[in-house]
Amino acid sequence: METIRVPARIEFWDSVYGMIRSALLPWGCEEQILEQIEIAVEELFTNIVSYGYVKNSENEQKTSLKGEVVVEAEVSGDPPKATVRLIDWGVSFNPLKKADPDFQIPFDERPIGGLGIYMVKKFMDQAEYERRGDCNVITVEKQLK
């Protein structure tokens, strides 16, 4: 298992991206599958960075809290399956409960948000959220073959 711990800031995405690639490429992961995993993990990481460590103060302005994100990636099984886990200590929130976008509504009339989590659900074979003590843990899995 490969693990990286980074500050919860978007500029650390490249480090997470590099770790994901180094964990999955030795397994002969097809580029399309690798890209789907990367998109899903980027969306989850971005949500943690954007919303997990932000609280509303009494005057309704957003205040950033310092935080970290741990990302773990491993491949196991036959056929091989990638498992990626994101752990943070931010606000308790399950993004997987977000309703899927209503594609019957014209694009310019749809509420903002939700498309990224929809892609996570569609690209990954499995996605789970749990709150462990003071941690959010999101685990996604994808068959590599």
Image (cartoon, rainbow, N blue to C red):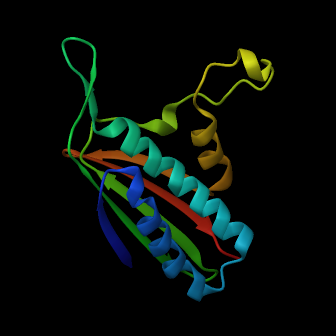
Q: Image height check: is 112 above or below 32? A: above
Q: Position of residue 128 (x, y in %)?
A: 47, 49
Total marks shown come to 0
Q: Extreme front residue here?
A: 11
Q: Image height check: is 39 above or below 58? A: below
Question: Residue at horizontal 57%, vertical 54%?
Answer: 40
Quadrant where the image shows the C terminus: bottom right
Q: Position of residue 81 (x, y in %)?
A: 58, 73
Visible in this render: residue 127?
yes
Quadrant where the image shows the N terminus: bottom left
Quarter of the rendering containing residue 57: top left
Q: Image height check: is 126 above or below 60? A: below
Q: Nearer the viewer, residue 92 or 67?
A: 67
* Left or right relative to 79: residue 93: left
* Left or right relative to 123: residue 90: left
Q: Nearer the viewer, residue 26 or 124?
A: 26
Question: Residue at horizontal 32%, vertical 55%?
Answer: 87
Visible in this render: residue 76?
no
* Left or right relative to 96: residue 114: right
Q: Position of residue 5 (x, y in %)?
A: 29, 65
Quarter of the rendering containing residue 49: top left
Q: Nearer the viewer, residue 59 or 102?
A: 59
Quarter of the rendering containing residue 139: bottom left
Q: Extreme top residue here?
A: 59
Q: Position of residue 134 (x, y in %)?
A: 19, 44
Question: Residue at horizontal 72%, vertical 23%?
Answer: 102
